[in-house]
Amino acid sequence: MDKKRYVIDTNGLISFFSRVFEDAPEFDGAPAISQRTRSAIELAVSPYEGGVLLSVPSTVFIEIYEKWLRSGEFFRKFFYEVFIQLKQSPNVEIRAIDQEVLENLLTVGGCLAKHDLHDKIVVASAITLECPIITVDHKIIEFVGNGEGKIPEVLN
């Protein structure tokens, strides 16, 4: 069975797992994701084979570690309630930053020219995989809407 693949960014992951992040001192709420997006992520994080493949660029975890994992208690909560669930799902892949992503990173410009590097790597991953991106980041949504990266669509 062919799976529908999506790349997810940090904000999309935090929005889906907001119940975990709400205990972090820095958390001031996450933009809501649509029911369609929530359903796609739920299918992906299921412990059963499904029709959705969620690709999580490794830079998403780097950004979470840099910005959110400030205490051992929150680190453990994130590790057991988010990372393990993602890692154990047959529908989730954690993707390394490979040569093709780095080459596509050089093409990410326009409204994202001065944007956060982590976000540009996520966008480059979606370009590499030629698949939709899950995000609530307005700049990435604008980038995709302008057709700059040839990413088919945004789920938000």
Image (spheres, rainbow, N blue to C red):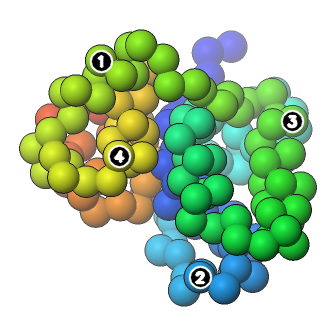
Q: Which amino acid does label 4 sit on?
A: Leu
> Mark 3 falls on what kind of element?
helix
Q: Which amino acid does label 3 sit on?
A: Gln
In the displayed structure, 29 sits above or below 34; it is below
Left or right, residue 106 beside residue 71: left
Tag nearer the camera, 4 or 3: 4
> Mark 4 falls on what kind of element?
helix
What residue sits 75% from the left and 82% below the top? Answer: 23
- Whole-angstrom CA distance, mark 1 to mark 4, is 14 Å
Residue at label 3?
88
Residue at label 2?
26
Question: Which mark sits nearer the N-terminus, 4 or 3?
Answer: 3
Residue at label 1?
103
Q: Which x, y percent locates residue 85?
A: 84, 46
Q: Residues within 10 Å of mark 1 (few under 14, many from 20)?
A: few
- State if disc 1 and disc 2 touch (CB < 8 Å): no
Q: How crowded is mark 2: few (under 14 residues within 10 Å), some or many (20 or more)?
A: few
Tag nearer the camera, 1 or 3: 1
Q: Which x, y percent locates residue 37?
A: 54, 54
Question: Which mark sits nearer the N-terminus, 3 or 2?
Answer: 2
Question: Which mark sits nearer the N-terminus, 1 or 4?
Answer: 1
- Whole-angstrom CA distance, mark 2 to mark 4, is 21 Å
> Mark 2 falls on what kind of element?
loop
- State if disc 2 and disc 3 touch (CB < 8 Å): no
- Whole-angstrom CA distance, mark 3 to mark 2, is 28 Å
Q: Which amino acid does label 1 sit on?
A: Glu
- Whole-angstrom CA distance, mark 4 to mark 3, is 28 Å
Residue at label 4?
117
Left or right, residue 67 beside residue 91: left
